[in-house]
Image (cartoon, rainbow, N blue to C red):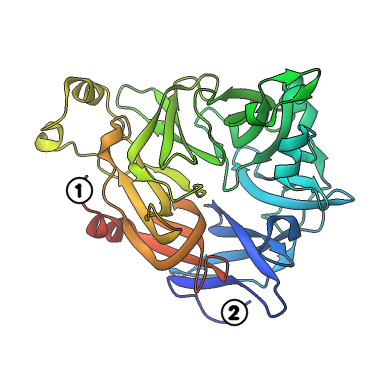
Amino acid sequence: MSGASSPASVTLFQQESGGVTYRIPALLYIPHPSIFLAFAEKRSSPNDQDAMYLVMRRGTVEHGGVQWEDMIAVRHAKLPGHRTMNPCPLYDPATKTIFLFFICVKTACSERCQILTGRNAARLCYVTSHDLGKSWSLTKDVTEEVLGRDMKNCATLAVGPGHGVCSLSGRLIVPAYLYYIHSRVCGLPLPWKTKPHSFIFYSDDHGESWHKGSGLWKQETVECEVAQVACSNGSDLLYCNARTSRHYRVEATSGSQSMEFGDAHFNKSLCEPPHGCQGSVVSYEPMEVHQEEDEADGRDESQKSCLKIRASSWLLYSHPTSSHRRMDLGIYLNKSPLVPSSWARPWVINEGPSGYSDLAVCQDAHTFACLFEGGKDACEKITFRRFTVEELLNNSSKP
């Protein structure tokens, strides 16, 4: 452990000589005690097929700073003959249990090969910790339990990456996606009819059983994250933000906590670079919720109707801000999540090459943290950065 508190920005994982690379950040904040858990994949090269296993660092919040312990391997998160990928943690405060989801993919089997052959080589797995990440259980494989009848048409699947959420009702919700075989000829899959779709799976019994929820079936979407949005009438919605290859992100909401997503749409305020990039989304409950009189000016009637039942939560979203390359990671703010056009112009927190990221909310301290890829190239290092509500508001522009 370092002897002094870390600054607001610190590199947690650094590319090593010989090609060893750390990719796919995932971040979890636990408020009592105040601890961050930062996860990544360790790879022998930047390539997906060279992933090996998951690593993590624990950060303890002390005197306004974070003291980070040395990197350790999550050794139990594995299956023989497989590489471990896509860390996706969530915390159940009722049982004080950390769930770390991931996929295990057969060694040397690429995602493209699985799509072309229609033969899934990925397993959906998790480990748990009851001591704030100091030790982990053995791996549990829940692939068949989650997919059920969809197993026969699943060419491949993945979880997250990023983080899952625990809803106000106690439901544990995990984002994922699968490549679904929509058509076969003589029993063989048609690769051009195998399409990706984001979906959610969940548990209502603190992880004793897991069930597949709704998916985004009208659009082709892959990596996604979700956040719970509280509304002024006492209800809440589950918001989903998903990666596409169609220039813009897809958004959707569910009023039944992942059972049915409706109104899925492309949001032209949230651009994608070519082939897309993973992004992260979280919700935040401000101390005081203000709805300015002029906020409804210039909106059409359908948008104004959304304000009659408005969200009391804000949404934060992190993603590269360039539509041409994975460049300039930004933080976007939406104070009115029920109005798609309400995303503010992004605050760029990492200029230059940027890649995957994951956000965390420290609701008790009204601060945020972002764990993101970037550097001379997007795979050079993974950096942790904290910022306050005031910083966010001062650097965010109006929509």
Amino acid type of the residue tagged 1 in the rendering:
Lys
Mark 1 packing: few (<14 Cα in 10 Å), some, or many (20+)? few
Rendered image quadrant of residue 8: bottom left
Give how far across and how far down residue 167 sits, in percent.
52, 32
Mark 2 packing: few (<14 Cα in 10 Å), some, or many (20+)? few
Residue hosting label 1: 398
Residue 2's label in the rendered image is 2
Foreground tag (2 vs 1): 1
> Do labels 2 and 1 touch, CB within 8 Å?
no
Give how far across and how far down residue 358 sits, in percent.
51, 53
Whether residue 52 is visible here, answered yes or no, is no
If the image is split into quadrants, where does the C terminus sit? top left
Seen in the picture, residue 173 relative to 103 is either above or below; the reply is above
Q: CA distance from mark 2 to mark 1?
A: 40 Å
Seen in the picture, residue 289 relative to 11 is either above or below; the reply is above
Seen in the picture, residue 327 relative to 84 is either above or below; the reply is below
Rendered image quadrant of residue 351: bottom left
Q: Is residue 391 left or right of residue 179?
A: left
